Image: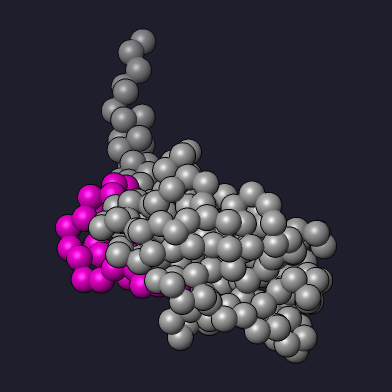
Amino acid sequence: MSTDPQPAQDGWRRLWRESVRPLLVLTILLTSFRSAIADWNDVPSGSMQPTILEGDRVFVNRVAYDLKIPFTTWRVAHWADPRRGDIVVLLSPVTGERLIKRAVGVPGDVIEVRHQRLIVNGQPATYEPLPENDALSHGIASFPLAAMAEETVAGRRHMVLAETAIGPGSDVGPLRVPEGQYFLMGDHRDTSYDSRFWGFAQRRAILGRAVGIAFSLDHDRHLMPRRERFVARLD
């Protein structure tokens, strides 16, 4: 007795047409969108504390500076470059993994770090104590208030954290930033592995700009939400 394979083949074709193919197309579109237009990153380390905390879900504008072919670093259009003070997402020159750091030096700048304090083009950054109310509103009251400060460079202000004045990376330079490269640092000056250790970052390695926090989960409190950090802008 012969078995007609046609019904089984028709069933597989229908499954492909009605379920598998639409899901595959949707997956390609979503991953391409994340690769080229907008992305969101979970932050696993504390190198950007107190600005970005472990458990923050960070929104990344992948077209802040240029348009790249999805899944590559090939640029097809360019309209801007990172400015001093921008928080950028890049591919690590050491491991190739994605990092989030702050651009503190742009091409042509002369960068120095003295006792964890930044000097740009011979002008020391200014440091002011972080008000306790600001620490509470940003959900960072658990950090030592005396170790946090508001750092201002060329009119742009952001929070930094440094518990020690002397240690690895506490004194660097002066170094002139080459054309097409950037000097990047984490806001947690004690723990960040950044340009002080692995050198300048290539412009082509920068994937986009981190512009906000979508939501945040506290890893130390069984992933409880940090509601004060929901839909927060990054400076």
Farthest left residue? Answer: 76
Can residue 35 be seen at all in this image of the molecule?
Answer: no
Q: Residue at x 73, y 77 (%)?
A: 139
Q: Position of residue 54 (x, y in %)?
A: 67, 60
Secondary structure mostly seen in magenta is loop
Q: Nearer the viewer, residue 16 or 110?
A: 110
Which portion, as a residue range, is magenta? 61-85
Quadrant location of the N terminus? top left
**Position of residue 186 in the picture relative to residue 17 (left or right):** right
Q: State the image coordinates of residue 87 (x, y, percent, origin top left).
A: 47, 68
Q: Is residue 44 magenta?
A: no
Give the number of callouts: 0
Q: Position of residue 44 (x, y in %)?
A: 63, 53
Residue at 63% x, 71% y: name it. 160
* Left or right of residue 57, residue 161 in this image: right
Residue 166: quarter of image = bottom right
Residue drawn 30% across and 64% down? 108
Quick check: 15 above or below 2? below
Q: Is residue 84 magenta?
A: yes
**Vertical placement of residue 210 versus 154, above or below:** above
Residue 82 percent coordinates (x, y): 34, 68
Q: Nearer the viewer, residue 7 or 92?
A: 92
Identify the colour scheme used: one colour
Residue 90 appears left or right of 71: right
Q: Can residue 219 be seen in this snapshot?
A: yes
Q: Is residue 77 left or right of residue 71?
A: left
Q: Quadrant of residue 159?
A: bottom right
Residue drawn at (31%, 30%) of the image: 9
Q: Nearer the viewer, residue 223 or 211?
A: 211
Whether residue 145 is situated above or below residue 201 in the rendered picture:
below
